[in-house]
Image: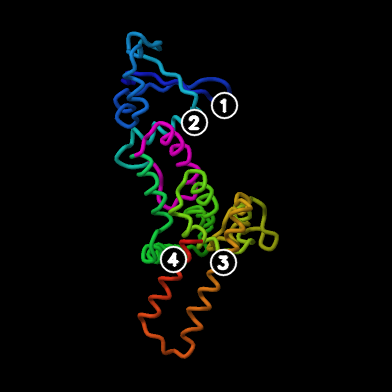
Amino acid sequence: MDGNIVIIAPLITGQRQIFRVHKSILSKNSPVFRSMFMIPGVQDQEMEKYDGVPLVQLPDGAKEVESLLRVLYHESVLPFRCLDPSTPSSVKQVLTLANKYGMDHLQDRIVRHVEADWPQSLWQWDMLEAEILVMEETWCNEYKNGPIDDYLPEPTSAIRLARECDIPSILPATFYHLSHLSIEDSWCNAHTSSINPVEPEVPHWHSFYGNRTADWTILSAQDYICLLQGKAKLASVADRLFSSSHMGNVQHSADVCSLSQGLTLLADI
């Protein structure tokens, strides 16, 4: 590899992993690394060497460092799939280190990617739901594909990411989606490998093949309370919207105003 600096990071096994990278890539993306390389006494000839090039030891886990480097070396396209349910766990590692090393531009790019899975406006939400509806309608009997949620964002992991990495912009959409699910719509049950007792030849997850699910086990007690409060407030908004139009004589402008108030309430929740 033609890198001009070596990074060493610890593995969970107690060993260390070596990454040979380019100082210019680190300096370009991180003011922390840029400043470190400019400190008097931290010049190439005065630094500890490995295989003839300067060596930097990081306290961060090797897995997290590798995830960060993969993103930095794929600058034009983020290595995360749209609508991927594993996105929260994948981007959290990168976001944590990007924040630590002052990589604001990278943080912004990743946040925008996450926000695309959880729309910020009503028309964006409707467009995404229409796309997902087409997927659901064509999912029937596609046993080989597995549960549909293997290809769609999962709300509770997104909520957890939003809390831990300060991405409040996705909370209204994640909670709204979660409010449509039953506690029985379980991600864990949909992904179990057990045999379907009714139809042994049919995978157990097939009972969930076209249903959306959530991993309720990782939703915090505080967020579960927030969900219940949100559902109650949404029900109240719905009652006001429809009770005011029971005579069928409400003007379109009034409907739009009420809907706008409802969406504002959803954002507040």
Contact check, label 4 and label 2, Cβ < 8 Å: no
Q: Badge 2, how many Cα within 10 Å: few under 14, some, many 20+?
A: some
The residue at which mark 4 appears reads as 264
Left or right: residue 131 versus residue 225 is: left
Q: Is residue 82 above or below residue 121?
A: above
Rendered image quadrant of residue 45: top left
First of labels 3, 2 by sequence position: 2
Q: Separation of disc 3 and disc 1 at Cα?
A: 42 Å
The amino acid type, in three-letter code, at marker 3 is: Lys
Could you tell me residue 256's position as x and y percent? 38, 76
Could you tell me residue 21's position as x and y percent? 35, 23
Q: Badge 3, how many Cα within 10 Å: few under 14, some, many 20+?
A: some
Q: Separation of disc 2 and disc 1 at Cα?
A: 9 Å
Could you tell me residue 71's position as x and y percent? 37, 36
First of labels 1, 4 by sequence position: 1
Contact check, label 2 and label 1, Cβ < 8 Å: yes
The residue at which mark 3 appears reads as 231
First of labels 4, 3 by sequence position: 3
Question: Which stretch is magenta?
Answer: 79-104
